[in-house]
Image: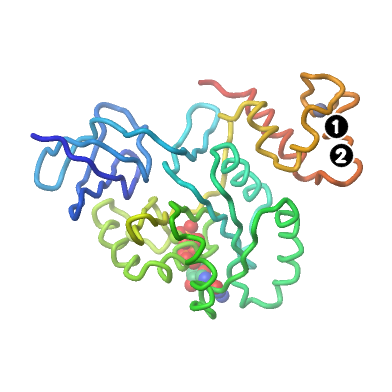
Amino acid sequence: MKELEGIIIAAHGRHYVAQVSERTLQCVTRGKKSDVAVGDTVFLKATSADQAVIEKIGDRRTLLYRSDQFKSKLLAANLTRLFVIVATEPGYSDDLVSRALVAAEAAGIDAHIVLNKADLADLLPKTRERLSLYASLGYPLHEVSAKSEPDAMCGVLTPLLQWHSSILIGQSGMGKSSIINLLVPGADIATREISEVLDSGKHTTTFTRRYSIDENTSIIDSPGFQEFGLYHLSEGMLERAFREFSPHLGQCKFYNCHHLQEPGCAILEAMEKGSVAPMRHDLYRQLVHESSQKLY
Ligand SMILES: Nc1nc2c(ncn2[C@@H]2O[C@H](COP(=O)(O)OP(=O)(O)OP(=O)(O)O)[C@@H](O)[C@H]2O)c(=O)[nH]1
Ligand SMILES: [Mg+2]
Ligand SMILES: [Zn+2]
């Protein structure tokens, strides 16, 4: 059979769905391979009218992934922009927000933060205050309410999506799917159809799904995460993924400084002076530790 070229639009474990022109095909990889991500360009061999085997993956522009001690898990390929979605309620974890930002930096993906559920007014001042740290680092922060101000929300986000391959990531319940359903009319229906194929169907998102908005614009919904391991990032990658470190890199007394406890460390000095947040440095320390624990 002839080779088909498609794009992976959904992934659930080792099962994938590819879009090939107007058709969607269920795909598997050969053997035990699971190195395919949503957003990948793939070359397929059809095995029936609606099934195919992934023969080859096209070159990737970017690759977003998580990892634990033993293996890495691909989140999406060819992204150019990432939105970390947080909400007034349920509460979000700063550790996870920063991890997502670090992952984006390391992958070369432009990161924004979206504060959803701004309609929950009681919680808004406190949440804004907590998020000011990221804004001070230069991450654009957008305040929206998918529920009470859907048009305003689309007005803020739609221009940011244009010409980009974007993903929404964040913890469960922050409103990622609610936002996507407003940005992509019909997304919920498409999701339900794929849920049947991939065997889920619950309210919470259980698989990663890409929607095409136009030829040059797409957006990916992803399941909420509770952890975001970054064992795959080396120390050298980590120090560059914390953007507030960059003015100080190369200024330490020792050229091979780990920025953990070394005398004359410019990053530690910056933290003492208040220009590096202790919370961010704690995460850096934790990630350096994770990096040293990697077993693959
Ligand atoms: N008050 C309020 N509730 C909202 C808003 N946006 C979404 N919600 C509600 O928040 C809940 C979770 O929304 P989802 O869109 O399913 O959240 P999600 O981030 O996709 O969650 P997972 O798929 O589990 O990761 C739903 O009950 C939504 O109705 C908002 O702007 N304000
Ligand atoms: Mg969801
Ligand atoms: Zn240092």
Front in this rendered view, residue 251 or 150:
251
Vertical position of residue 81 compared to residue 118: above or below: above
Front in this rendered view, residue 204 or 94:
94
Label disc, if present, on residue 270 of the rendered structure: 2
Image location of residue 98, percent across then percent down: 66, 47
Vertical position of residue 274 compared to residue 123: above or below: above
Secondary element at tag 1: helix
Which amino acid type is shown beneath numbered disc 2? Answer: Ala
At x 75% / y 55%, what residue is drawn?
136
Which amino acid type is shown beneath numbered disc 1? Answer: Ala
Image location of residue 234, percent across then percent down: 62, 26
Structural crowding at the residue carrying mark 1, measured as other residues with C-alpha within 10 Å and reported as few (<14), some (14–19) or many (≥20): many
At x 28% / y 53%, what residue is drawn?
199
CA–CA distance between discs 1 and 2?
A: 6 Å
Vertical position of residue 3 compared to residue 214: above or below: above
Which quarter shows the N terminus? top left
Ligand number 3: quarter of image: top right
Query: In which quadrant of the rendered view does residue 46 lie?
Result: top left
Image location of residue 287, percent across then percent down: 67, 33
Structural crowding at the residue carrying mark 2, measured as other residues with C-alpha within 10 Å and reported as few (<14), some (14–19) or many (≥20): some
Image location of residue 26, percent across then percent down: 21, 45
Residue denoted by label 1: 266
Query: In which quadrant of the rendered view does residue 78 lie?
Result: top left
- Mark 1–mark 2 CB contact (< 8 Å): yes
Q: Is residue 60 left or right of residue 263?
A: left
